[in-house]
Image (cartoon, rainbow, N blue to C red):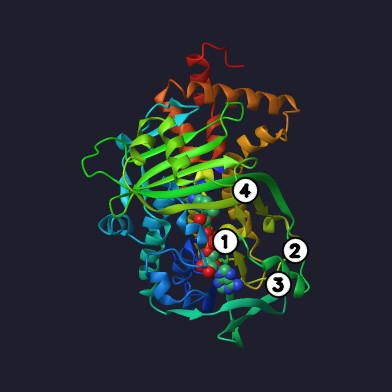
Amino acid sequence: MDSPITIFDRLGTGSTPVGAKVRLRTAHVLGGGVAGLLAARVLSDHAEQVVVVEPDRRESLLSGAVRSGAPQGSQVHLLLPGGRRQVERFFPGFVEEAVAAGAVLCEARRTVAYLDDAEQLPTPNAEFLASSRPLLESLLWRRVLALPGLSLVHGRVTSLGFAHEAVNAVHLARDGHRTEMASDFVVDATGRASRIPDWLHRGGWPRPETDRLAADVRYFSARFSRSSTWDGPLCGIARYTPGFPTDIAGAAVNAVEAGQWAVMLARYGAGGDGLTADALTARCRELPPVFAEAVRGELIGEVVPHRHPHSRWRRFDALERLPARLAVVGDAVASFNPVYGQGMSSAALHASCLSEFLRSDTDLDAAARSFFDLQGVVTEAAWRTSTAADAVRLGVAGSARTEAEQRQARAMRLVHRAAAQDVEIATAVRAVGFMTAHPATLLSPELVARAANGNGVEDR
Ligand SMILES: Cc1cc2nc3c(=O)[nH]c(=O)nc-3n(C[C@H](O)[C@H](O)[C@H](O)COP(=O)(O)OP(=O)(O)OC[C@H]3O[C@@H](n4cnc5c(N)ncnc54)[C@H](O)[C@@H]3O)c2cc1C
């Protein structure tokens, strides 16, 4: 078995997938959000026909506007380097196309990050694709609809059919009618509210256990007009450690399409119910300069709130019984505290897991265990990053018990401390947050020794 670092590196590759074989007649993707679209692209290498089932209408999917099936589209979304690499891998030329459509590639020299209001060292890997999520999704839809053998079916999936220990049908409701579609492979990408546990249960299969961490984050996003003469940072991120005296969990401003800034403030539960436009503007003016700049122009629309009650990971990887010909991707598997911006990148890496699984010679009449194992590596990496601070804040962080765990925890502290003054270490730490490297890379003996040296500590 390869180490998680090796698996993560392999999945995160930017190289074109080779060795695709058509092994399926008809595959179905349930849900056409970012996760579903990338899964559809992968399936098109392996199935004669790919059917995406989505309740939102084609016009709305292509409109570039927030749609009812993905209301989180009104919130600030940033595509991290790990996700960008996969999107570009499966849709070559996508980033250029997105930029031509108004998305902004925030280069490292125009990105600024703060931790507890202190500016972090700039690193060469801090490069993001910034746009509204609806713009990104509409461009993905255009690419997906152009794939050979692909069709979009309007409808809402209500359950799955099973036969011979495998999924064999998709049941859906469409314009008041119930329909059944025979399927050779189903990918559930219906998002955080996915009913897949119930669909499995109804078919006589166990529901997956769910890991939960209460984050209770209130997100507030708004758009402001952006000055055409601004030549400072195009992307600003501020995060706060659990002990820092502020009610803000994080803040982000990104230059996006249509000459606008997308501005976000996130607060933890208590007292975080509402935020007027005036209050959001006032809070941003108290933050570092790029935040004040982003709210200098005219407010466009209104402040849109969003509540994220908890981070959640459905453990399909731990299920003892699972039907064959089924995969689950994106938020339907795990949804994280959005402050870390990992959702779309995780979904993109899930597509890479699906590609590796379907390119292998695995028996498709057995449960897709190797797919869920690969996905477990990606999800665990994102989960570790996004829950660490929340676990400390909630007082539920596990303490290192064994000597080896204590050593690891000490090494991790050294590395994080050294990241404040050593660009190489800061780049390695950021690579984990940006989903281009597995968290275990931070424990490499070379990096830990370098961190210990820089901190004036003996590496033991
Ligand atoms: C406030 C907030 C901020 C975020 N910021 C970022 C960020 O900066 N960067 C980032 O990478 N991620 C971010 N995310 C996460 C990101 O939105 C998701 O993780 C990512 O888009 C993957 O979503 P998905 O495709 O799995 O699900 P969704 O986007 O929820 O899509 C699910 C799709 O399934 C369809 N559907 C639902 N039910 C059915 C059904 N029964 N039958 C058929 N179709 C159905 C829906 O209509 C929808 O199209 C943020 C999330 C939130 C909430």
Pointer 1 residue? 329
Give the image location of residue 35, x and y in percent. Answer: 50, 62
Q: Which mark is residue 199?
A: 3
Q: Quadrant of residue 397?
A: top right
Pointer 4 residue? 1
Pointer 2 residue? 207
Residue at the (58%, 58%) spot, across then down: 331
Residue at the (73%, 24%) spot, across then down: 403
What is the number of callouts on the image? 4
In primary-sequence order, the first of circles 4 and 2 is 4
In primary-sequence order, the first of circles 1 and 4 is 4
Instruction: Identify the element where label 2 is drawn.
Output: loop
Q: Is mark 1 within 8 Å of ligand 1?
A: yes
Residue type at tag 3: Trp
Q: Quadrant of residue 135?
A: bottom left
Residue type at tag 4: Met
- Is label 1 in contact with label 4 (beta carbons under 8 Å)? no
Residue type at tag 1: Val
Give the image location of residue 417, x and y in percent. Answer: 52, 22
Residue at the (52%, 45%) spot, across then down: 275
